[in-house]
Image (tube, rainbow, N blue to C red):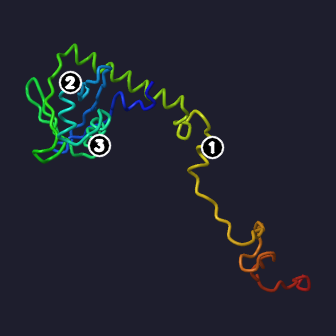
Amino acid sequence: MEQNPESKSVLCTLLDKNDQSKYVFFTQKRPAGDINIGFTNGEDVWKTHLSEETLSQFFKTFSLKSTEDYTFKLKCACKAGRAFVKLQEDSAVLHLGAEPTDLSLSLSKLKESEGRTEVKELLFKMADSLQQLESQGSSSSFSPLKSPQKRSAEFEPRKQHMGPVVAVRKRLPGDSLINPGTKRKKPATGVAFDDEEDE
């Protein structure tokens, strides 16, 4: 059993460097050593099959050692924004660089029913990958369901303690702002004279 799931297939986003169109790029390694490569915009699917002989020619041309190296090169080109697509009526050409010597692939457009099946399989493959990551505990650090107290503490600013902590006395109503601890003096109202003698 292979430990690395990416040795069997690759799934990533392809952002066309020319018109910024988004596609889901995928590869499917088959037990015979050959590989299927394709991409979809969610509606249409373009796909090609590379035999073992075709792959070995690519290995020689691009100095690659294995199918994993080849799929890694494809994935890097897609993620780095070097790839672009030229769509035709029933096919597409995927270019993985600007130079003529860079890798390019011709892919056939699948029929509508085949395309729907392929998109459905990709959707379930993505869900399985997420579930596998979750079961391995990779998503525990950002899962909102696991530990909300821990998660909220991670995003709070850290309290910096510099020097001894001084207790601050709460100011009571009527206390002076300038001399804390003393009562505020009321302003003078004048002298009160007794008017008893006048009566």
Instruction: Tell me: 175 left or right of 35.
Output: right
Work out which quarter of the rendered image holds the N terminus and state it.
top left
Q: Residue at x 52, y 36 (%)?
A: 138
Q: Nearer the viewer, residue 35 or 148?
A: 35
Residue 52 x/y as whole percent:
22, 25
Residue 67 x/y as whole percent:
29, 32
Q: Which residue is mark 2?
A: 51
Disc 1 marks a residue whose amino acid type is Lys
Residue 119 x/y as whole percent:
29, 21
Disc 2 marks a residue whose amino acid type is Ser
- CB within 8 Å, label 2 to label 3: no
Q: Which residue is mark 1?
A: 150
Disc 3 marks a residue whose amino acid type is Cys
Q: Residue at x 29, y 24 (%)?
A: 33
Closer to us: mark 3 or mark 1?
Answer: 3
Q: Earlier in the sequence, mark 3 or mark 1?
A: 3
Q: Residue at x 48, y 26 (%)?
A: 131
Q: Nearer the viewer, residue 77 or 172?
A: 77
Q: Which residue is mark 3?
A: 76
Residue located farthest toward the top when viewing the structure as drawn: 113
